[in-house]
């Protein structure tokens, strides 16, 4: 899989996004252990696919090191597939195989939240983590994971109104380490909200009585995280809150903020031995807090040498800002997309090398709109106006993460449905390739401020791929494929039907039973049979399915063939007739598949093949009742179906090509039925009957799709376990060697799904 890195701003704005993006975020968080999610940026991008994945799979990365991505997924509500349960996801391991957060046992959320980890295939294994207050009592949360997902950080209740930072590690995260065990009575609250890539260093904050209950930034390191490094900023006259929110992959650089009052934040970076060097990124310091300005770091480059976020002066307008150089003393105002560079902008993420910055910016002509924006080039002077997903380019959009190689990015945007959708965009490398002149990043003067420039910007909104709409088109393709696979069962059953011939004679039968994809489609089959003896005959059929039989997204391109053979034993007994019939059939289609499109989705096209094999065993009999003109027949049987669609890949010319895994579906069905046949006139027979089918055993009908290595999207379909068929009609004997049957039937799988069919059969002997 391809890795992405996502970094977000630091405060919890609690925007719930629909869950499509969990899997996107899995691939986007590229550079360190998964980090805490406290804000709308990454949170809203993640929310869409854990809801589908935790619901369908939990209902969607590889990474060398997930360095400093601050996940922002708090308050993602995602009911688990096996139980109605409120769930929030806060972090994801770098390989995407482990996610952490919390789950409420009761929907009213009054019983407390339990720190929870989901792992295994499609996060199907749920592990509720122990707490410091009894095994599972109280409100606890997983906020961050190491790169491999084996170490989790967060908090746990310790006593009434007291919570402590904790680490879960070991087998199944069963080892619980209280990071405040040395002085538990002194700390009211502490939270670990960031881990280094190897999980050996944790960052966060603690609240202590001896510091007037102000929060102090904290690093836990060493064996069992026993070494506590208080990074708190001390001011005797004005108590200051501080916290660590981002740690570099190697744990050597930490960034966060400090404040003296609500709404006042000032970015700070800790570095050097034991993180003892404080680097203030605006003009505030512990001795001189300037309330007229604020700043925040949302992201660090892989080596921690470049920081991105915002700076706001007295006008309180956020301006996208990069800090770099020695002690991060060089500050670059990245400006906006407006011609005069005025307005709002902010950096949410940096590429691994720090040479590209992504975020949002004000635009000309619409004060309420902000466009997703990428800054690159020397001193990040070039801009790409990515736009929004709305057809009139209004609304709000932002860049959330870059691929490891810098060739693509993701973000979120308001769409025409007025909902937030995640999007993907390819970045032409020749446009975003940055000069390798290392002098650019050398320190010049302390706290130098470089003004924004407007050398160039490009509009590339046409290249945006709406991931929510892409998800919908994949579900539509899966639905068409499932319909085709299900209809194959009926086709294979028809191919096993045939006529019965007496000794040394031939019989034929033309069956025009409609398919189940669309009621207007008709699939005629011509069966030929031969009687070896008066009680034993065999026969078969070879046919080519009609093009109109397929859904609109599928088109036959060759090798479409179906065949079936059967053996029939029938004999007259004392009380009537008995028969026994084994049969087998198969079908194959080579098909072109065209994915439907929605706004900002792509018209992917590929080639595949469908295969089906069915075997059945049926037996039954009949005899007259009341009079020779009224007969009762019964039948029962069992059928095994094996159906599949081959794996295929869409044309790579599109931005986001999709690879479809093989779909395999097997089932065993049993049925029992009865008919009444009444001879009204000599050539005319009235027939009425009923058949009940039951699924005895089946595999899951699942479509797994790999979207360009970013994530796996899963669609599934549950077939009805039971169905019933009621039929009535007439059989007209044209002569002793030729008859015509016309039967109307209704198939009912449930009270909401009923389908009428007309079946015409012409049969004869010669």
Image (cartoon, rainbow, N blue to C red):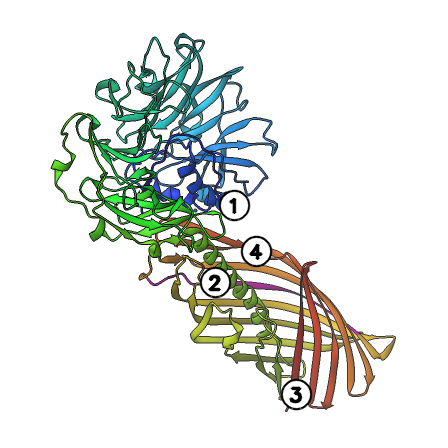
Q: Which mark is residue 698?
A: 4
Q: Which mark is residue 764?
A: 3
For the stretch drawn in magenta, what is the main secondary structure? Answer: strand
Please state the extent of the stretch shown in magenta in the rendering: 632-651
Q: Which mark is residue 510?
A: none
Q: Are marks 1 and 4 in contact (CB under 8 Å)?
A: no
User: What is the secondary structure assignment of the residue under circle 4?
Assistant: strand
Image vertical order of residue 213 relative to residue 711, above or below = above
Q: Nearer the viewer, residue 335 or 138?
A: 335
What percent of the width, then of the height, locates residue 9?
Answer: 37, 33
For label 2, the crowd category at 10 Å Cα-Cα, with few meaning under 14, some 14 to 19 and many 20 or more, is many
User: What is the secondary structure assignment of the residue under circle 3?
Assistant: strand
Ranked by sequence position, the earlier of labels 2 and 1 is: 1
Q: Nearer the viewer, residue 719 or 698?
A: 719
What percent of the width, then of the height, locates residue 624?
Answer: 82, 76
What residue is drawn where x is 43% and y is 45%? 21
Q: Is residue 201 left or right of residue 154?
A: left
């Amino acid at each position: 899989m391809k890795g992405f890195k996502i970094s977000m701003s630091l405060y919890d704005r609690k925007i719930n996004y629909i869950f499509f993006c969990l899997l996107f975020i899995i691939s986007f968080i590229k550079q360190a252990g998964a980090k805490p999610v406290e804000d709308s940026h990454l949170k809203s991008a993640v929310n869409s696919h854990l809801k589908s994945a935790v619901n369908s799979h939990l209902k969607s990365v590889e990474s060398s090191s997930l360095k400093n991505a601050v996940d922002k997924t708090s308050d993602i509500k995602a009911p688990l597939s096996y139980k109605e349960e409120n769930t929030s996801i806060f972090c994801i391991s770098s390989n995407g195989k482990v996610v952490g957060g919390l789950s409420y046992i009761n929907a009213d959320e009054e019983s407390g939240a339990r720190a929870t980890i989901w792992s295994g295939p499609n996060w199907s294994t749920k592990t509720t983590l122990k707490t410091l207050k009894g095994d599972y009592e109280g409100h606890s949360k997983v906020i961050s994971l190491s790169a491999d997902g084996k170490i989790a950080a967060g908090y746990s209740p310790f006593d009434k109104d007291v919570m402590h930072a904790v680490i879960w590690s070991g087998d199944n995260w069963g080892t619980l380490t209280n990071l405040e065990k040395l002085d538990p009575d002194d700390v009211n609250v502490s939270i670990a909200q960031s881990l280094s890539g190897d999980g050996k260093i944790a960052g966060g904050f603690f609240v202590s009585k001896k510091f007037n209950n102000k929060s102090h930034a904290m690093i836990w390191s060493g064996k069992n995280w026993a070494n506590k490094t208080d990074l708190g900023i001390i001011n005797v006259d004005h108590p200051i809150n501080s916290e660590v929110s981002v740690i570099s992959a190697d744990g050597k650089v930490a960034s966060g903020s400090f404040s003296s009052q609500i709404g006042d934040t000032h970015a700070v970076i800790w570095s050097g031995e034991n993180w003892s060097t404080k680097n203030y990124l605006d003009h505030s310091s512990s001795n001189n807090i300037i309330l007229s300005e604020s700043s925040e770091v949302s992201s660090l480059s892989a080596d921690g040498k470049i920081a991105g976020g915002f700076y706001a002066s007295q006008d309180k307008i956020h301006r996208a800002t990069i800090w770099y150089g020695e002690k991060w003393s060089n500050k670059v105002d990245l400006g906006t997309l407006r011609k005069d560079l005025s307005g709002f902008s902010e950096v949410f993420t940096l590429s691994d090398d720090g040479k590209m910055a992504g975020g949002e910016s004000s635009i000309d002509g619409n004060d309420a709109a902000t466009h997703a924006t990428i800054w690159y080039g020397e001193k990040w002077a070039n801009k790409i106006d990515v736009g929004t997903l709305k057809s009139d380019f209004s609304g709000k959009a932002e860049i959330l993460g870059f691929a490891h190689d810098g060739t693509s990015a993701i973000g979120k945007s308001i769409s025409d449905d007025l909902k937030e959708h995640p999007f993907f965009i390819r970045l032409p490398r020749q446009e975003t390739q940055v000069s390798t002149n290392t002098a650019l990043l050398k320190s010049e003067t302390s706290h130098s401020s470089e003004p924004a420039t407007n050398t160039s910007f490009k509009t590339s909104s046409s290249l945006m791929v709406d991931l929510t709409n892409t998800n919908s088109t994949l579900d539509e393709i899966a639905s068409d494929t499932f319909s085709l696979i299900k209809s194959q069962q009926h086709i294979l059953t028809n191919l096993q039907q045939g006529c019965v011939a007496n000794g040394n004679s031939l019989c034929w039968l033309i069956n025009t039973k409609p398919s189940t994809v669309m009621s207007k489609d008709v699939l005629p089959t011509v069966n030929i049979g031969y009687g070896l003896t008066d009680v034993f005959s065999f026969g078969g059929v070879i046919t080519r399915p009609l093009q109109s039989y397929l859904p609109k997204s599928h088109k036959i391109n060759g090798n479409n063939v179906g065949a079936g053979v059967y053996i029939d034993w029938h004999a007259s007994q004392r009380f009537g007739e008995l028969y026994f019939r084994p049969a087998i059939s198969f079908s194959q289609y080579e098909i072109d598949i065209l994915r439907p499109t929605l706004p900002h989705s792509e018209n992917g096209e590929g080639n595949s093949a469908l295969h089906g094999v069915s075997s059945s065993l049926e037996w039954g009999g009949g005899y007259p009742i009341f009079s020779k003109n009224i007969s009762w027949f019964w039948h029962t049987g069992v059928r095994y179906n094996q159906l599949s669609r081959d794996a295929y890949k869409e044309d790579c010319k599109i931005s986001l090509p999709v690879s479809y895994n093989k779909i395999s579906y097997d089932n065993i069905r049993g049925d029992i039925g009865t008919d009444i046949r009444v001879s009204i006139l000599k050539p005319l027979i009235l027939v009425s009957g009923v058949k009940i089918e039951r699924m005895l055993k089946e595999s899951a009908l699942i479509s797994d799709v790999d979207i360009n290595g970013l994530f796996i999207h899963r669609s599934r379909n549950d077939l009805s376990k039971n169905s019933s068929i009621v039929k009535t009609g007439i059989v007209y004997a044209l002569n002793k060697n030729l008859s015509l049957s016309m039967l109307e039937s209704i198939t009912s799988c449930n009270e909401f799904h009923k389908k009428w069919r007309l079946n015409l059969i012409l049969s004869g002997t010669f």
